[in-house]
Image (cartoon, rainbow, N blue to C red):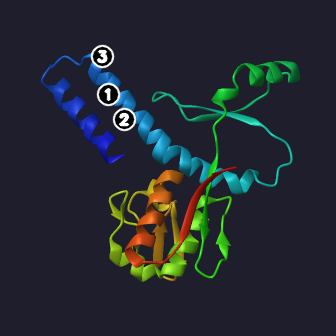
Amino acid sequence: MEKLEKAYQAIDLLESIDFPITPELMGIIARFEKEYLREEVIPLIEQEMAPLLEKMRNSFELEITYNPEDALNITLVDRPKVQAQLFAEEQPSKRQKKYIIRVIFPDNHVSCKHMVWETLMDVIRFAGPENVQRLGINIMGGNLVSRQLHENERYRVGQKEVEPGLYVCTYSSTDTKLEQIKTINRALNLGLKIEKQML
């Protein structure tokens, strides 16, 4: 989000001096926005919604629509059965792939949680939260493991208490969590075997 906010500030500054805003500049903003959605917003939505939906026995399609001038709108897509089947056959490549992380610890026990942040938490508990905190792994402008709750409520929602008074920022994509686990493993010489798997 930091990079996107700086881009917005740059556009505001250019507009304030009547500098022409070209389609190329707006294209860069759009690319930053998509990156922000992909890396920060979607993982948080998945993280918060999964516990609400995981007990459901049927598949449903939700559509999220956002316009700066309107409220966020989430609707249940209710396609006729035949239409839905044709839609799936025509666009199989657009189905988003879901990945999880599998970690094998030195004693051969395995952490491979459906919620990827839980696997990250298992690794941090094994490594020792304070040891990980000392590594200073940066995420969202702060430490991955911190004694402070983030001042931004959006990020604070993604902080999970790993032990009393210590919080892990889980507000990130699966790939980011994978790199965090690899960093912890290397820095603390934990001897973990780490894999990314498709669900």
Residue 139 versus residue 4 in the image, above or below: below
Q: Decide: marks 3, 1 in contact (CB < 8 A)?
A: no
Residue ID for mark 1: 28
Residue type of the residue flagged with mark 1: Ile
Q: Is residue 55 left or right of residue 188?
A: right
* Residue 120 visible in rendering: no
Residue ID for mark 3: 23
Q: Is residue 22 left or right of residue 176?
A: left
Q: Residue at x 44, y 63 (%)?
A: 180
Q: Residues under labels 1 and 2: Cα distance?
A: 6 Å
Residue 70 versus residue 114 in the image, above or below: above
Q: Is residue 159 left or right of residue 118?
A: left
Q: Residue at x 47, y 82 (%)?
A: 128
Residue 4 versus residue 91 in the image, above or below: below
Q: Residue at x 82, y 23 (%)?
A: 85
Can you tell which mark lies on residue 32?
A: 2
Q: Residue 49 location in percent, x, y?
A: 66, 51
Q: Which residue in the rendered view is the most extreme toward the left?
A: 17
Q: Decide: marks 1, 2 in contact (CB < 8 A)?
A: yes
* Residue 111 visible in rendering: yes
Q: Decide: marks 2, 3 in contact (CB < 8 A)?
A: no
Out of 82 and 65, give the one closest to the viewer.
Answer: 82
* Label 2 residue SS: helix
Residue type of the residue flagged with mark 3: Pro
* Label 3 residue SS: helix
Residue type of the residue flagged with mark 2: Phe
Q: Residues under labels 2 and 3: Cα distance?
A: 14 Å
The answer to which of marks 2 and 3 sits earlier in the sequence is 3
Out of 17 and 128, give the one closest to the viewer.
Answer: 128
Q: Residue 138 location in percent, x, y?
A: 34, 62
